[in-house]
Amino acid sequence: MAVNDKEFLEYVVKSLVDHPDKVKVDRKVDEMGVLLTLDLDPEDMGYVIGRKGQNARAVRTLLRLVGARNSAHVNLKINEPEGGRAPREGDDRGTTTEEADTSAVDDLKI
């Protein structure tokens, strides 16, 4: 029995997320191999990506194994939803390291 890479990806991702009905996988084949494009709810991005990208890396590894069984090179592209990566409250992404360091030094009284 050959495993369909698209169905496999849908099964794995739907098992991870809170909104499985919003998971959409698009499959395209070209001379480079198979490209699976994943769209999902913005709230579920963290579950699919995982801490430091560990979940996404694991899913990509499994897809490579499924592709190897079917003699195909499978790649995964995870589409970032519109408005993704918005800075959270208390997030200091806007300040540079120098600004953060000098403000800490200014507070010291010697």
Image (cartoon, grey):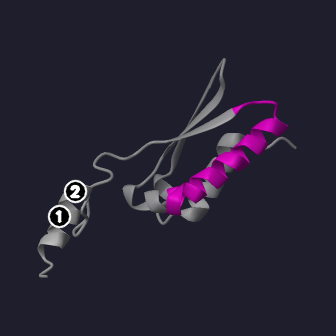
The magenta span reads 47-73
* Residue marked by disc 1: 102
Could you tell me the amino acid type at mark 2? Glu
Q: Quarter of the image holding residue 94?
A: bottom left
Residue 58 position within the rendered picture, expressed as x and y whole percent measured from the top left: 66, 54
Residue in the picture at 76% in, 37% down = 67
Residue 45 position within the rendered picture, expressed as x and y whole percent measured from the top left: 45, 57
Q: Is residue 62 left or right of residue 91?
A: right
Q: Is residue 64 magenta?
A: yes
Could you tell me the amino acid type at mark 1? Thr
* Count of numbered circles in the view: 2
* Residue marked by disc 2: 98
Residue 101 position within the rendered picture, expressed as x and y whole percent measured from the top left: 23, 64
Quadrant assignment for the C terminus: bottom left
Q: Is residue 82 left or right of residue 41?
A: left
Residue in the picture at 72% in, 31% down = 73
Quadrant assignment for the N terminus: top right
